[in-house]
Image (spheres, rainbow, N blue to C red):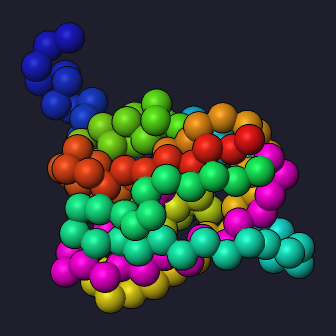
Amino acid sequence: MHALQISRTIRIAAALAVLLPAMGVRVLAHDNHASYAAGEPGDPKKPSREIVVEMGDRYYRPKQLQVKRGEQVRFVLRNDGYEDHEFLLDTTEANLKHAEAMRKNPGMEHGEPNGVQLAPKKSGEILWKFTKTGTFEFACLIAGHREAGMIGTVVVK
Ligand SMILES: [Cu+2]
């Protein structure tokens, strides 16, 4: 493709990325979430196990978790760092794809039930039901953070 066409395509994609979510449409990096790889959003009426994950500047604690298939988990996330951080629960492939989309579109916001972004000293929750066995990943996809160690795993047995 011609360089001018490429830059035009990127501009159109960026404009759509801003407009479509406002209309309630999932686009770009989010269209691969039609069914969530790591399970499904939890049901607040059902019991859940609480797991507290502390987020600091470029780390999670704990960074390795084990759950049983079918288990519902209430993740309580606390950002104890001095920077914004996020927690996105997915497969490694999906997180890498998502990170790439964020590099192209800095400031991109997430509205997915499998993730939360937190300002310093804030906390948040995710209610998640693990319906599939396997190894999943939680990561912070703000540029450079995952690479610097903001990554952890959930093993579902
Ligand atoms: Cu981070």
Residue sitting farthest toward the top: 1
Is 28 drawn above or below residue 26 in the view shown?
Answer: above
Instruction: Decide whether residue 85 is among the magenta residues.
Output: yes
Residue sitting farthest toward the bottom: 121
Q: Which corner quadrant holds the C terminus?
A: top right
In this rendering, would 149 be left or right of 115? left
Is 58 drawn above or below residue 9 in the view shown?
Answer: below
In this rendering, would 131 be left or right of 139? right
Q: Principal SS element in the magenta part?
A: strand
Residue sitting farthest toward the left: 3
Residue for point 39% across, 87% down: 122
Residue sitting farthest toward the right: 46
Residue for point 42% across, 80% down: 78
Determine if residue 29 is in view: no
Q: Residue 125: image x %, image y %?
A: 58, 77
Residue 113: quarter of image: bottom right
In this rendering, would 32 be left or right of 59? right
Residue 85: quarter of image: bottom left
**5 vs 14, nearest the viewer:** 14
Q: Which corner quadrant holds the N terminus?
A: top left
Q: Residue 38: image x %, image y %?
A: 65, 44
Instruction: Decide whether residue 64 is among the magenta residues.
Output: no
Q: Residue 60: image x %, image y %?
A: 37, 63
Determine if residue 59 is in view: yes
**104 vs 13, nearest the viewer:** 104
Q: Residue 28: image x %, image y %?
A: 46, 40
Is 101 drawn above or below residue 79 in the view shown?
Answer: above
Is 118 drawn above or below residue 21 in the view shown?
Answer: below
**138 vs 50, nearest the viewer:** 50
- Specify start and end residues of the magenta stretch as a single range: 69-89
Residue for point 61% across, 44% down: 155
